[in-house]
Image: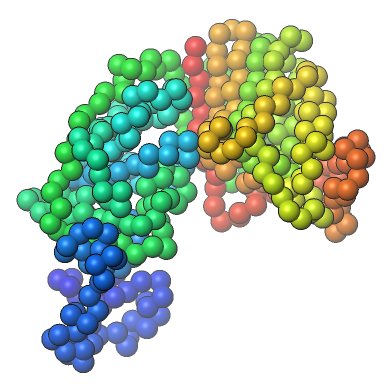
Amino acid sequence: CPHCETGCNDCLLDSQSRHDFERINRKLAKDWLGDEFSYHIGMRDEAKLGFTDGHYAPGSIENVLRRLINGGAEELILVLSADTHEWDMVAPQFVKALQHYVVHDGLKLRLVVPATIANIEDTQILKDLQRFEFLGVSICTAVKTLNPSIVAQAITGYQITTLASRSIRVTLPGEHWHQSDEIVVVSKSEPILQTNLIEISPAVKSDNFFIKDLSISSELNGRYASFGIKFWAYIAEQDERIARSLSQSKIQKISYSDRYLQNPVAIALLGSIFFALKPTIDQSAEVGIHTLFKTVQVTGKKIHDDWCDQDDYEKYAKTWLSGMTGRPIKLLMAGSNRDIPHRRQLSITFNDGHELRLRLDQGFGYWRLKFYNFNDNFFDFNATANEQLTLMVERVERAEVNNFDQKWSTDILIELSK
């Protein structure tokens, strides 16, 4: 290690060993191990993931890349998973990592996307890629089929360092971006990835004239009855055109997509958001919910648990949300994860021609209902759907909303277009 005499963050120190800093001495350890110790701890061929010179690198992909950047890397090539259905392109862990590489580190950055991106029907993904393109990121496809284990390459002068992992999710844009329990394998012999540059901008018409990434933590905490009102007041503060549409225009269409709406609290919070809009929802407006019902083996007992019975869930969700909007609810149930995007997006179309899109990083799972009466935390999923609705009406009158994780904020990406 060129940075220390005994131990540092680039070699031996991490979250576990830092408590033993005073006792760590890498030179004494090397003398004790002897000159041939590396031969005895070499990796098996199958663990090298197809690289003849593959060797273990401590830490996550993110950690290894940071060490390479600190060592003088000038360019990064990052491979994205081919499973675009699972992409979460506004996850802070993904967005902030890319922004940091380009803006703070001043690196050239290439994202290698699957060749199928050219035919993708989900235009929102193309718009997400377009934002990175505007940042200066090159969007590319690979010329040849890649070793499926390759995650990234770092270019330092004429030296190419390739990072690989067995993990499937490590290349998936989202909360686990470049994080995995699988070991990281590094190779110095792999040639630089050959890529073809693709231009997203000509293929996608950008109709956004306002876009902002908003962080929220405890701003909406308080009585459940005021949650939706606070939510829209906070959104309206971000731009006068949003405020004008929300207060002066009629809503013609509302759609919300979220895989995780299977518990009474999520439906209640979404309902509160809708209820605050109810005075401006047109009598002929369409309200659609796209979600997923996952099999649950054990009937829950708590109000934050998921429904086991899909019929009860659908009847409850439609009735509750219809009451909050004054309109019938079109509930579209996806058959699997692949049938519904990972993102949680609320879209509202106004009669003034504006469309407001909100991308909620953690959806409504970021908030919880708090009750001062302990018994209010229980919920009878064995009751009929109508009985459950009556029970929930009584509960929310006494409920308060708190952000679930007091240490971390959640992000909402706001887009206004016409």
Residue 243 point in image, percent of width and height: 60, 20
Q: Seen from this angle, which residue lies furthest left?
A: 158
- Give above or below for 176 relative to 141: below
Which quarter of the rendered picture does the N terminus lie within? bottom left
* Residue beneath the point at 88% across and 57% down: 375
Q: Residue furthest bottom?
A: 32
Give the vertical position of 207 relative to 236 (above or below): above
Position in image of residue 193 (x %, y %):
18, 43
Residue 329 found in image quarter: top right
Residue 217 makes an appearance in the image: yes
Is residue 226 something that shows in the picture? Answer: no
Task: Tell me residue 5's x, y (percent).
Answer: 18, 80
Report the side of 386 relative to 90 (left or right).
Answer: right
Q: Residue at x 19, y 79 (%)?
A: 38
Q: Tell me where residue 86 appears, x and y as whole percent.
A: 48, 40
When the figure is inspected, residue 383 is found, relative to residue 413, above or below; the finding is below
Name which quarter of the figure residue 407 lies in: bottom right
Q: Nearer the viewer, residue 142 or 318?
A: 142
